[in-house]
Image: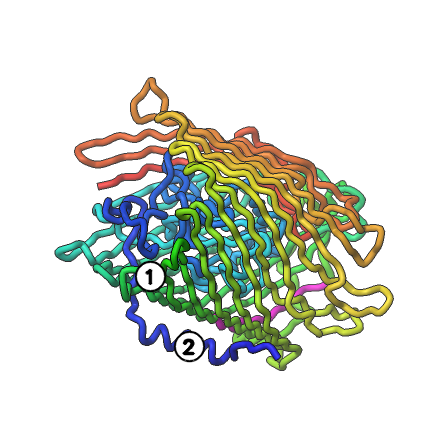
Amino acid sequence: MPLHPNPTRVRSLSIALIAVLPAFTPAWAEDSVTLDTLEITDSVPVEGDLQALPYAGGQVAPGGRIGVLGQQKAEDVPFQIIGFTEQLIKDQQANTLADVLRNDAAVQTGFGYGNYAETFMVRGFTLYGDDVAYGGLYGVLPRQIIDTSMASRVELFKGANAFTQGVAPGGTGVGGAVNIEPKQADYEPTTGISLGYRSASYFDASADVGRRFGRQQQWGSRLVLNHGQGDTAIDAERRESTAATLALDYEGNRARALVNIGYQNQEVDEGRSVVYIGSGLTAIPDAPENSANYTPSWVTSTMESLFAMTRGEYDIGDDWTVFAALGGNRTDEFGEYASPEVSNTDGDATASRLTVPFESNTLSALAGMRGRLITGPVSHQLNLAVSDLSRKTRSAYTMSSPAFATNLYDPADPAYPATVFAGGDMDSPKVNSRTENAGVAVSDTLGLINDRLLVTLGARYQSIDVTNFDYDGNESNRFTEEQVSPAFGVVFKPRPAVSMFANHMEALQPGAVAPFNAGNAGEVTGIFTSRQIEVGTKVDLGTLGGSVSLYQIDKPTAYIDPDTTLYGNYGEQQNRGLELSLYGEPTPAVRLLGSATWVSAELLDTADPADKGNQAVGVPAYRYVASVEWDLPVVNGLTARANVQHNGPQYADIANTLEVDAWTQLDLGARYRMTLTNVGITWRADIENLTAEQYWASAAGGYLTQGQPRTAALSVDLSF
């Protein structure tokens, strides 16, 4: 019988390690790395080393945090990873995570099912905001909309990631993972104030103050505050956003520590919703005017989160480091929703009110050790980590009936509909789910031929325990499962500027619950195991970098067997893709950031044999993203910017009869940097969707998310 660690012991070990290890971690930020750190090449990578430095042009980081492997340079790992810097976030006036991730062609953004959660398709598979990590920890960040004011880097890991990242609490991330690195104090004092405006009348202000203290500047603090409110460019839509983070850190000779506390509140009134697809629809209707709003005036959503995270490490020798991290999140949400279901190309639709309170509490922990040793001609980078995540959610609902009539092009605004259906206690919702994820990961990266050949071997044991409850608090179903996910990767450097890589990785997801009309209604299908193979090449020419990769991901899909009426993992979706990327600064006055992807997302087995071989729902056949910046020679400090996104067609149904058209969006902008009496001032002006294209941006999930209207964005940053 195979031996598997007991999940309770895994959790106990995790908590014990956190209790006995000093809470030490680094102080790093975009410009805070010293020359001494740059020269370290033979010691264990530490949290604040050169992976935090920007690549030429300042838009991309040359590495990032790769789960159990810690911070690594992209050229040294057999995976695709790209990090977008704080400078890019500022220069693009990117307010949310979706604004940042749209810079990579492998990511398509949309809204959640009936709410305003930003969701992502990475390599053709869903990634929820619930499953975005913060400083390497799942379950810490707000779950629907993530404000970027807290981010020093946004890191995108492409591909299956069960070994490196573990199982995310929301059960998504087959095609990739996202990690946000928190801001910390730089070694240069930071004092910044920013004022901004977005059409129609949305104003925001932020403050950013960071300092280091002590004889050796070993203590640091950074406070970031941001608030915005007003009407958006969508008719009658109003938003309000408040975010605050405080980071305290210590960096000594052997010990490094970080404590980060954050708060975020997002309010959306009369927000434009997604559009559901009616069963009788024969073609996708044209998108309405890009500023149109087909949502009733009583629709609203409030999302409030309080979160905290501490992480640290201690060097127990020149080549060995122990580390630990602990984080948690408390979220309270309340929403009044009414998404229309369109029935014909004339835009006729129906909608019902759904009111939902939602609460969640999450605690996440990580602890382990990493080190380096040499055995003859072979070097070893060793990693051992244990992780644990515990999450509890509460919910209830009320719903109106019958549905009211409306139209996408001439929307109705009915009075608030009365409640007909209800479940749970709206004032004090009962627990509706408990999730316990525990894991142990181990890896060894062997370096041969003077580290020109790097071979990574690893495995993660993962235990998943999910219990679901009805709205009265009674247990409805539960499943517990254990699995070991192996990983293999190789990097070969034929030349210092070229890294050729290959990997075999897996992704794990808790299975879906069988629907009410299945013969095994209420049962859980167990754990989904998706498998990936990938090969590619990365190039670093000093001022220009890029990559090309080919991948295949095979993911099981569940459906009701028409012969047995049982719901199970009978189907399979296979995504095969080609990705290209280019970034850097070909000349001192020009910066490039571009990528392209082509995806064949084929359904290999389906409930209806007629659907076999079709393209998966919501996966565009291709996507291109390109941006360029040019420092204009006519005025010192003036930079022009252009960004183009082009999405290929995608299907909104499994039968591939409802096709969403390809679309293109053009954004233009400029910024001007100046100094006035020792105050650095940066003016920024952008126009998003300059040509006011009307389009459906996404059909992911089988529903439609409309593209944003033409939007003007202005801001001024003052740095003291």
Please report contact status of discs 2 and 1: CB closer than 8 Å, yes or no: no
Name the spot of residue 171 as percent of width and height, x first.
Answer: 58, 63
Name the spot of residue 156 as percent of width and height, x first.
Answer: 49, 49
Principal secondary structure, stretch drawn in magenta: strand
Q: Looking at numbered disc 2 in the image, what kind of residue is underneath it?
A: Leu
Camera sees residue 292? no
The residue indicated by pointer 2 is 13
Number of the label disc, if any, that sits on residue 260: 1
Number of the label disc, if any, that sits on residue 380: none
Name the spot of residue 268 as percent of width and height, x first.
Answer: 50, 53
**Residue closer to the observer: 331 or 644:** 644
Give the residue drawn at x 49%, y 53%: 455
**Residue closer to the observer: 99 or 57:** 57
Q: Residue furthest right?
A: 563
Q: Which residues are magenta?
A: 389-401
**Residue closer to the observer: 333 or 482:** 482
| 575 relative to 471, above or below | above
Q: In this image, 712 relative to 718: left or right? A: right
Q: Secondary structure at mark 1?
A: strand
- Dot 1, crowdedness within 10 Å: few (<14), some or many (≥20)? many
Whole-number angstrom distance, CA of label 2 to CA of label 1: 23 Å
Mark 2 or mark 1, earlier in chain:
2
Mark in front: 2 vs 1: 2
- Is residue 174 shown in magenta? no
Give the residue drawn at x 87%, y 66%: 563
Q: Secondary structure at mark 2?
A: helix
Where, quadrant-wise, is the N terminus in this rendering? bottom right
**Residue closer to the observer: 331 or 657:** 657
Where, quadrant-wise, is the C terminus in this rendering? top left
Give the residue drawn at x 36%, y 48%: 51
Q: In this image, 484 relative to 311: left or right? A: right
Camera sees residue 380? yes
